[in-house]
Image (cartoon, grey):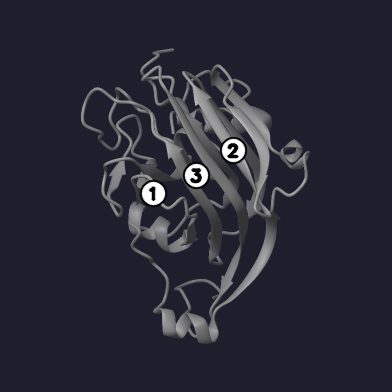
Amino acid sequence: MKCRYHRSARIVITWAFATALTSAVFLELFFFRQRMFVPASLAEKTAKFRLVKAFPFIKENSLKEWEEKVFKGKVLYRIEKERGVSYVRASSDNSASALYYRIKMDAKNRRPTMKWKWSVEKFPTKKAPEVLGGETEDDFAARVYVIFPAMFITNWKVLEYIWAETIPSGTIGTSPYSKNIKLIVLEQGLNKDKKWASEERDIYSDYVKLFGRKPEYNIGAIAFMTNTEHTGTSADAMYGDIAIGYREDPDVKKEGGRP
């Protein structure tokens, strides 16, 4: 297997083995601030978020329900509390490992929505200018994934949300290793005031925007990762209040499915 493959997207491989869909497969598939919801005024009046699963990370053993895939050394994921706020701190030192959670969500007939907060304290040090989807120095302080598994691993789809250091928020790209992995930069640069950035993504709308069509498969997993194995440096990020559910907008219907 070529070491140049997109290590962060190997989450897909782990999931495939876990579900026994790829027991005979040895091929590795490497995985804008612009909102894509209805107008805020309409959303506030009509939208309802039906929670399916939440991760407040308030207990010391909160990470036990998450599985870990190690690519090169273990990233230190640990629960921390500060000023009454609980979260996961990810500290990567020349390492790459991801935490993923298997969950079944209807993306073909409903509007799955994912919420989370995150923050970055230290970015990987890169020698070249930072690019989205580059084959070298492919390290980012924070990544969040939504994974759409299929019967054949080559048909899997992945949405990857990124916090970059210099790439502008709203930048969209495609992984150089697979057209089935779409990248979206949501945040740029350090939070100098150390405030959390909160995200709320309409997964259905993001999928249509990035892939140009409605989802063919349902959601099978979500994940997050901080990695620095390509640069051999270090990074620190924090993740909190991850929640996934369905957005139910009575006045906003999509073709062929329920709101």
Residue lying at 24% horizontally and 22% vertically, measured from the top left: 127
Against 135, residue 243 (above or below) is below
Residue bearing mark 1: 192
Q: In this orientation, which residue lies closer to the viewer: 187 or 121? A: 121
Amino acid on which the number 1 mark rests in the picture: Lys
Q: In this orientation, which residue lies closer to the viewer: 170 or 2? A: 170
Question: Mark 3 or 1 closer to N-term?
Answer: 3
Q: Position of residue 177 (x, y in %)?
A: 34, 29
Would you call the spot at circle 2 few (<14 residues within 10 Å), some (14-19), or many (20 or more)?
Answer: many
Residue bearing mark 2: 89
Residue bearing mark 3: 144
Between the residue at mark 2 and the residue at mark 1, the CA separation in whole angstroms equals 17 Å
Element under disc 2: strand
Residue lying at 35% horizontally and 27% vertically, measured from the top left: 138
Against 141, residue 57 (above or below) is below
Q: Judge left or right: residue 59 versus residue 184.
A: right
Element under disc 3: strand
Would you call the spot at circle 1 few (<14 residues within 10 Å), some (14-19), or many (20 or more)?
Answer: few
Amino acid on which the number 2 mark rests in the picture: Arg
Residue lying at 30% horizontally and 52% vertically, measured from the top left: 169
